[in-house]
Amino acid sequence: MITAFISSFVITVVLTILSNEVLGKMSIVMAFLILIFFILLGVVFDIIGLAIATADEKQFHSMAARKIESAKFAIKLIRNAEKVSSFCNDVIGDIAGIISGSTGAAIAADLFLFEKERVDFLGRLLIMGLVAAFTVVGKAWGKIIAINHSNYIVNVVSKIVFFFTKFTKIKINVKNRFRG
């Protein structure tokens, strides 16, 4: 819990500073693209977290027996589903939701800064409502995908993790923890 608290705090502060610095120096179109990025980031990580929590480990044992390296990462992800899902859903997914909300508010403030009070209120209300609606619908749609295609998603994520660790200096020890 302490790790989740600290990582959530640090990630939120860093992303908020970056988004505030970047948003102030870009066009409204780019600001909307940043907003869409944060919404999609939250949706994608919610999909990954739920897929890992609902995936079946058996398929990956078969793949590991055939010497498919990424399968070991998949097994490790599934065996640590509680931690991985918590990180993906609660840390990254929720932080992305918070930052997309604040980004939407910043865009609304920028768009309606010199408008009449009534237009300002309605404009901000519209933008914040759309941000919330897209986030909720995206996450609901993502849950359907995650549950129905969990093994496929875990396979893709494990390949990405494997690729990342293979071609960088970062090493993740899976051999000592792999039982099967």
Image: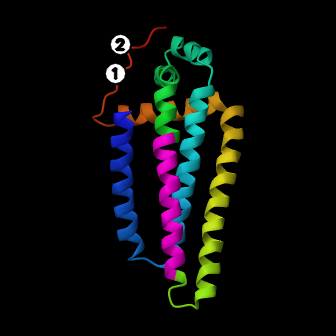
Residue wearing tag 2:
176
Q: Secondary structure at mark 2?
A: loop
Q: Quadrant of residue 149?
A: top right
In-image side of 102 versus 56 (left or right): left
Q: Are marks 1 and 2 in contact (CB under 8 Å)?
A: yes
Q: Which residues are magenta?
A: 90-110
Res 173 label: 1
Q: Residues within 10 Å of mark 1 (few under 14, many from 20)?
A: few
Residue 43: x %, y % from top left: 59, 48
Toward the left, the furthest residue is 169
How many marks overall? 2
Residue 136: x %, y % from top left: 66, 53
Toward the top, the furthest residue is 180
Q: Is residue 120 above or below residue 62?
A: below
Q: Residues within 10 Å of mark 2 (few under 14, many from 20)?
A: few
Amino acid, disc 1: Asn
The N terminus lies in quadrant: top left
Residue displayed at 38% across by 19% down: 174
> Can the viewer see residue 30 in this picture?
no
Residue displayed at 44% across by 34% down: 161
> Can the viewer see residue 161 in this picture?
yes
106 in the magenta segment: yes
Residue 58: x %, y % from top left: 61, 14
Q: Is residue 117 above or below residue 77?
A: below
Observer-nearest of 65 and 175: 175
Residue 17: x %, y % from top left: 34, 63
Residue displayed at 34% across by 35% down: 3
Disc 1 from disc 2: Cα separation: 7 Å
The kind of secondary structure the magenta stretch mainly shows is: helix
Residue displayed at 55% across by 13% down: 61
Q: Secondary structure at mark 1?
A: loop
Q: Is residue 146 above or below residue 62?
A: below
